[in-house]
Image (cartoon, rainbow, N blue to C red):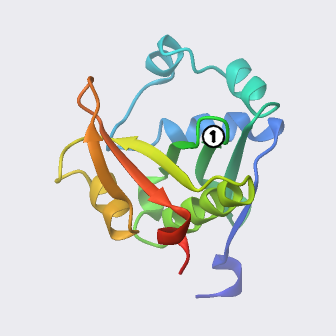
Amino acid sequence: MKQEDVVDIRVAQRADIEILFQIRTSVTENHQSREEIAALGITPASVAEMLQTDCRAWLAEQNGRGIGFAIANATEATIFELFVRPEYEGQGVGRALIQSAEAWMWEQGLTQIWLLTGNDLTLRAYGFYLHLGWMPVGVQADGEMKLAQSVFQGVS
C-alpha cells in the first residue's frame, strides 16, 4: 500500500455531515435514498443534533475523500450506522471503523454493545459482523437480527 493510499479514521464533525449522507446513499446493499432516510427522521439537522449528545461518528478518509463512516450511541449501547463506499469494500475500512466505535464504547464503561442487521446470511453485513466475533442474540419484531459483543469478546 502506498503512503497516499493510507486510510485515516477520525471523529466526524458537523462539517462532515454532507459527506456521511453521500456515503450512505452510495451503497448498493441496503441502499436508501435521501428521501427514504428523511422519512425515517434522519436528516442533516437530526444528525447534527445527535453528534452533540451521547453519539459519536467516525469518518474514514483516503486521500482526503470520505470513504466510510460509523455512528454509535453510548446511552443505547449500540452501533447503528456503518457504511463503506462500494469501491472500498473488502479493504479493511469497515473493520477499522467498527473497531473505533467499539473502543469508544468500551471507554464509556459499557460491557456489552449491540447492533441490528438484516436477518439474511447472504447479506455481506451479516457475515462481516459474525466474522468480527459479534454473536446473534435474537430476531427483532421487524425481522432484523440483533447481534451483541461483550467487552471480553472485543478484546483481541
User: Which sits in the foreground, 53 or 81?
Assistant: 53
Which amino acid does the dot numbered 1 rest on? Leu
Q: What residue is at 58 percent from the left and 43 percent from the top?
A: 77
Q: Position of residue 15 (x, y in %)?
A: 82, 37
Q: Seen in the image, is 74 located left or right of residue 148?
A: right
Give the answer, above or below, for where 44 lies relative to 131.
above
Which x, y percent locates residue 150? 50, 61
In this view of the protein, which residue sits in the foreground, 3 or 106? 106
For the N terminus, the image quarter is bottom right
Residue 52 vs 81, above or below: the answer is above
* Mark 1 lies on residue: 20
Q: Residue at x 48, y 53 (%)?
A: 85
Relative image position of residue 141 (x, y in whole percent): 26, 23
From the top left corner, tell me how far across and down residue 98 is, in percent.
55, 60
Q: Is residue 135 above or below residue 44?
A: below
Name the element at disc 1. Answer: helix
Dividing the picture into quarters, in which one does residue 46 lie?
A: top right
Q: With 105 as the anchor, is 129 left or right in this view?
A: left
Q: Residue furthest top?
A: 39
Please, is residue 62 above or below residue 29 in the view?
below
Residue pictured at 66% horizontal, 63% vertical: 103
- Residue 10 occupies which quadrant of the picture? bottom right
Q: Residues within 10 Å of mark 1 (few under 14, many from 20)?
A: many
How many callouts does the rendering have? 1
